[in-house]
Every structure is written in C-alpha cells, then in structure tokens.
Amino acid sequence: MITLLAMHFPISGTDINAAYLVVIGFLIGILGGFFGVGGSFIAGPALRAVGMHWNYAVGTDLAHIVGKSVVAAKRHRALGNVDLRLGFIMALGTIAGAECGAQLIQLLKRRGDVDFVVSVISIVIYCSISSFMIWESWKTMRLQKKRARGKKSRSKKDISSFSGVTKAIQRIPLWPIISLPTSGVKISLWVIVVVSFIGGLFSGFLGGGAGYIRMPMMVYVLGIPTHLAVGTDLFEIIISASYGTFSHAIKGNVDILVALVMNTGAAVGAQIGAILTQYFAGPKIRLLFVPLPLIGAAVVIYTLFTGQKL
Amino acid sequence: MTLSHRTANGPGKRSDFDRKTVKAEARKTLISFSIELVVYALLVVAYFFLVLHFLGDWLAHLDKQHIRLYALVSIALIIGQAVVLESVTTFLLRLLRGRSE
C-alpha cells in the first residue's frame, strides 16, 4: 500500500509517498486546530527531508496552511471561538507586517549577515516566549487552585496573571476605540494593528505563519480569551496565508498538488485539535503551547551550528 | 446526560455510574473515529488516483505557461478542497455517531 501511494509531483519534480504527506498533514492539523499555529517548523523540515527544494517547501507549506486553517477555523466557528471583526482587522496588519519583514530580510541580505542575525533574534524570541508562558500559565493555574479552594467552585472565565498589564493596555485612550463583543474587549484599533503588524513582521522575517508569537500576544496584549485567540488566529491565517501563497505561487515556489495531498490528512487532524480545545482550560492550553517555540529554537540552533537548513 | 448527573452529585464527585457512562462514551467515540478513518482513507485514496492524477499535468502546464492563473487556481483549489473535506468529515462523524458533533 505504501509503495502503491508513491506519487510523482510534476510541478516540483519530486517523488514523495502520499501516505507520508497525509501523516505529516494530520500531525500539523492537530497542532493547528489546538494551538492556532501554522506548524511550519514541522512542515518545512518534513518536506525538505524527502528532497523538496527549500523554496518549494516554504511556498507549499503556506498553501497547505491555508487549507488546514479553513478546516480548523470552520470548526472553531461552530464552537463560537472566532471573532470575525478582530480577524479582519488583524489580517490587514499582518499583511503589511509580512511585507516589511520581507524587506528587512532583503536589507540584511545586502549587508551579508542575514543568517546570523535572523538566527540569533529568533532564538532569543522563541526562548523568551516559552519562558514567559511557563511563568504566567503556572502562576495562573496556582491562582485558580487557590480561588477554587476558597470559593469551592471553579470559575469558567479565562483568567491570566498578566491581566493587570493587559487592562492597562486596553485603557490606552487612542482614537478610534473599537468594541469586540465576541471577545468582550474594548480596545484602541491601533493596538490591534500594532500587534498584528508585529506578528506579520516576524512571519516575513522568520518565515511561516508566526502563530507562536501572534497567539500569545492576542492573549496577553489584547486580552482575548485563549479559546477565541486560537480560533481567531486561524481565521486571520486564512487571509494572510492566502496572500503569501499567491505571492509565492507567482514566484514559482508552490507545488499545489503536494499541499492538496497534505491537506487530506490535515482536515481530520485540524478537526480533532479544534474539538480537543473544549476539554482544556485557557492556562492549560497556554502551558501546553510552551514546547512549540522551543522546537522552533532547536531547529534554528541546529541550522546555525551545522549550516544545514532542516 | 453526563453533565446533569455530574451536577446532581456535586462538583468534583463522580459516581460509578458516571465513570461507566464516560468510559462507554469514550469507547463509542473511539470506535466511530476508527471507522471514520477507514472510510475516509478509502475516499482519499480514490481521490488521489481519480482527481489529482488527472489534475497534475494540467496544473504543471499552468505553472509553466500562466503563472498568475496558476496562483489563483491554487488558492481556489486548496480552499475548495478544505471546505469539501470539512463537510465530508463532519458528515461521516454524524452518520457514524448518529448525532451532531
């Protein structure tokens, strides 16, 4: 069966086992549905491992992210986890940020130290996100336990130990202030634009969807409940990754057939991941998120020391 | 049903009946999911050979000759397939479990 599923992909000129692609898609689908991330840190190396050129791996991964995000966002929407207004605003900031990130890469390329600078910055950022999220979610879970003991009941509200700073950010009186009824947040439009711009900047600068930075920022900076942050991030990814796919496709970097095959596995995985979020509280999802940026950091460290892109 | 029993027994306390109900529910979900995967796998294999096999050459031609059209078709295909697959998996889940998810 495995030999039977070996397929030739004429666009990228590679021969890949379809079962391998389906399994990779399935695993990334679970991660995407549960955490709201694109999963480029797995898809990129997985495609490279079967001999696909780096440019095709990046573009094809983006196309696959679009499909997986459609499935997961549809499921999250059915669960009431998508804030459409927030998603549309963030998509604009992300696209602008991604373009700036790509320009920044070109600038560093001209200086000749792009690999070293990008690697060091990404390692610092990945490790900082993980450390911060360990500290915050651990502290929040302890706080929740204390409260539950005191009141003998469990609050369903998504609390965070960082909520003081989040509230201060929400009070910034910068016109226009917009209301997000689905998320239960009122905040300056510019804060949302800045957050999504930073997410896009990292997406263009480091590659992939940059969900590892956007999802935590939506929770800690904008104050969006974790479940809604996951669903809205996926919705926003559909728009920004579609733009990225188009941009890569016209540069000849997308093998859509590979993405379509991967997506058959991701369709099941993304639904499982989205349904699983129902069984975990916000702080637990955030704590489980911690290894993802660390895996990203490990991939970059490997690349930096061996000189080989995974 | 499980929720109402849990509430009746108070938070944090689960009777043997609750535990058995949860176990039976989990077993049912696992069996349904396994059947769903097998049916889905057969559909996907058929899809690979019937659709992607014939699409391959046409898409490769588009990629070489009309790159902008190829980019648009790529996005339409990946979104269209995702919508169809989501509907198929949801339908299979409903069919096998006998109720909506």
Image (cartoon, coloured by chain):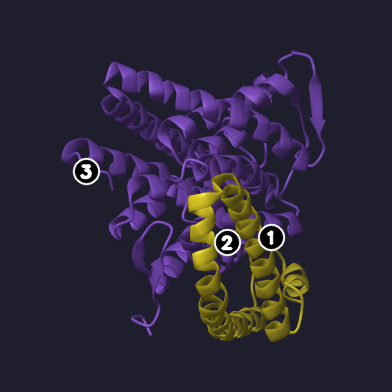
Image depth: mark 2 or mark 3 in front: 3
The crowding category of the residue bearing disc 3, from other C-alpha atoms within 10 Å (few below 14, some 14 to 19, many at least 20), is: few
The crowding category of the residue bearing disc 2, from other C-alpha atoms within 10 Å (few below 14, some 14 to 19, many at least 20), is: many
Q: Secondary structure at mark 2?
A: helix
- In the figure, A11 relative to A186: above or below? below
Q: What residue is shown at x 49% (from left), y 62% (from top)?
A: A257
| Chain A image colour | purple
Where residue A303 appears, as percent x and y from the top left, is: 24, 40
Q: Secondary structure at mark 1?
A: helix
Q: Is residue A285 left or right of residue A4?
A: right
Which of the 4 image quarters holds residue B82?
Answer: bottom right
C-alpha distance separating marks 1 and 3: 38 Å
Task: Give B24 or A170, whichever is nearer the viewer.
Answer: A170
Query: Given contact means CB atoms under 8 Å apart, are the residues at marks 1 and 2 in contact?
Result: yes
Report the label total.
Answer: 3
- Numbered label attached to residue A75: 1
Where residue A92 appears, as percent x and y from the top left, is: 67, 31
Q: Chain coloured yellow: which letter?
A: B
Q: What residue is shown at x 58% (from left), y 81% (from top)?
A: B43
Q: Single out the residue that lies furthest toward the front.
A: B65
The residue singled out by tag 2 in the image is: A270
Task: Give A261 or B66, whichever is nearer the viewer.
Answer: B66
> Label 1 sits on what residue type?
Arg
Q: What residue is shown at x 73% (from left), y 18% (from top)?
A: A171
> Label 3 sits on what residue type?
Gln
Going from N to C along the chain, the mark reached first, 2 or 3, is 2
Which of the 4 image quarters holds residue B14?
Answer: bottom right
- Numbered label attached to residue A308: 3
- In the figure, B87 relative to A43: above or below? below
Q: Are marks 1 and 2 on the same chain?
A: yes
Q: Single out the residue that lies furthest toward the left.
A: A306
The crowding category of the residue bearing disc 1, from other C-alpha atoms within 10 Å (few below 14, some 14 to 19, many at least 20), is: many
